[in-house]
Image (cartoon, rainbow, N blue to C red):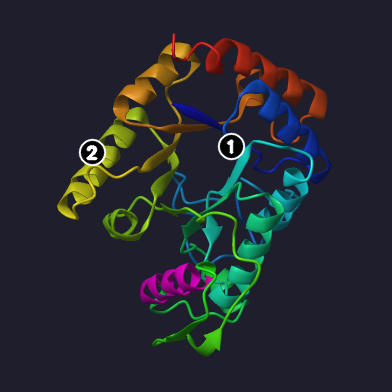
Amino acid sequence: MKFSLSIAMSPLDQLGGLARAAEEAGFSSIVLPDSLFYSEKVSADYPYTPDGSRFWDEETPWADPLVATASMGAVTERIQFYTSVLKLGSRNPVLLARQVNSVAALTGGRFGLGLGIGWSPEEFEWCGAPYARRGKRFDEAIEVLRLILSGDMVEFHGEFFDFDKLKMSPKPPSRVPFYIGGHTDVALRRAARVADGWSSAMMTLDQLRETIGKLKGLLAERGRGGDPFEFQAVCVDRFGLDGFREQAEAGVTDAITMPWVFEGHGFGAELGPKVDAIRKFGDEIIAKIEE
């Protein structure tokens, strides 16, 4: 079982220190969330809270995940980075491919692309992307990304995106893995079809166990039952050494966590207590999980 550190909603001037501390403590990856802006009003509910409300406000700090990866990659050597999840629905995949290419090269291939459609109609519309038929557009955008990130001279002529032959250099030093987020049946089928793994939002262990079981069945149906596949999870009701072992038994391969929360600190806590919590987690959980 691997562990990934979530830096969601941390002040931007802490990111380098958090990344270095996570690498030293034995974390496998840094997880980067995505939020384009805070609109005063939204015309849809946030799908991952019981009442549909957002649990951040207009003053909450958010770094662009690709810019943040480049920054943290420059002060680390081994730790991986992935988005969980970047909202592809409101972005142009050709422009995004340029950014991913750059980040993959700058980090020496230490980057994975976690993707979701996005939930806010305002993020689509105000960025010039249609909210209607967003699922079909998302699928085609993934095709575009895979094609361009191959490093070959490629062209694409689809329903939503159309371009003649182009090539982006430098080619990523290694294949960029794609992870799909989302809890719906459509999202799970998409992950089984096109992805190297699946990322959860906040879920209980029972929900994770059920969802991972569905995904394994979908992978088997597609002849992918024996393929490497990541189950990246934010579990909200199992903690401590025994709790993480339960997650592993349920099929979680990568536990996403924020150690300072266990010590009573919030998103905006000072860097020092966060680093202390990361080190403690490394000593008491990561170093002992395989014992």
Quadrant of residue 125 within the rendered picture:
bottom right
- Report the mark closest to the observer, 2 or 1: 1
**Residue 172 sits above or below residue 5 on the image:** below
Label 1, secondary structure: give it. strand
Q: Residue at x 36, y 19 (%)?
A: 246
Dot 2: few (<14), some (14–19), or many (≥20) neighbours within 10 Å?
A: some
User: Which is nearer the eye, 34 or 132?
Assistant: 34
Q: Residue at x 60, y 69 (%)?
A: 96
Dot 1 amino acid type: Ser
Residue 272: give x, y in percent of width and height: 81, 23
- Mark 2 or mark 1, earlier in chain: 1
Task: Confirm whether the magenta stretch covers residue 143.
Answer: yes
Residue, far left: 221
Quick check: can you spot residue 109?
yes
* Residue named by callout 2: 213
Residue 91: give x, y in percent of width and height: 57, 72
Task: Give the quadrant of the N terminus.
Answer: top left
* Residue named by callout 1: 29
The magenta stretch spans which residues?
A: 135-148
Asked if labels 1 and 2 touch by Cβ distance under 8 angstroms, the answer is no
Residue 131: give x, y in percent of width and height: 47, 76
**Residue 76 sits above or below residue 66 on the image:** above
Quadrant of residue 251 within the rendered picture:
top left
Q: Main secondary structure of the magenta part?
A: helix
Residue 287: give x, y in percent of width and height: 55, 13
Label 2, secondary structure: give it. helix
Task: Confirm whether the magenta stretch covers residue 213.
Answer: no
Dot 1: few (<14), some (14–19), or many (≥20) neighbours within 10 Å?
A: many
Q: Is residue 210 left or right of residue 258?
A: left
Q: Residue at x 52, y 73 (%)?
A: 148
Quadrant of residue 55 within the rendered picture:
top right
User: Which is nearer the eye, 150 or 179?
Assistant: 150
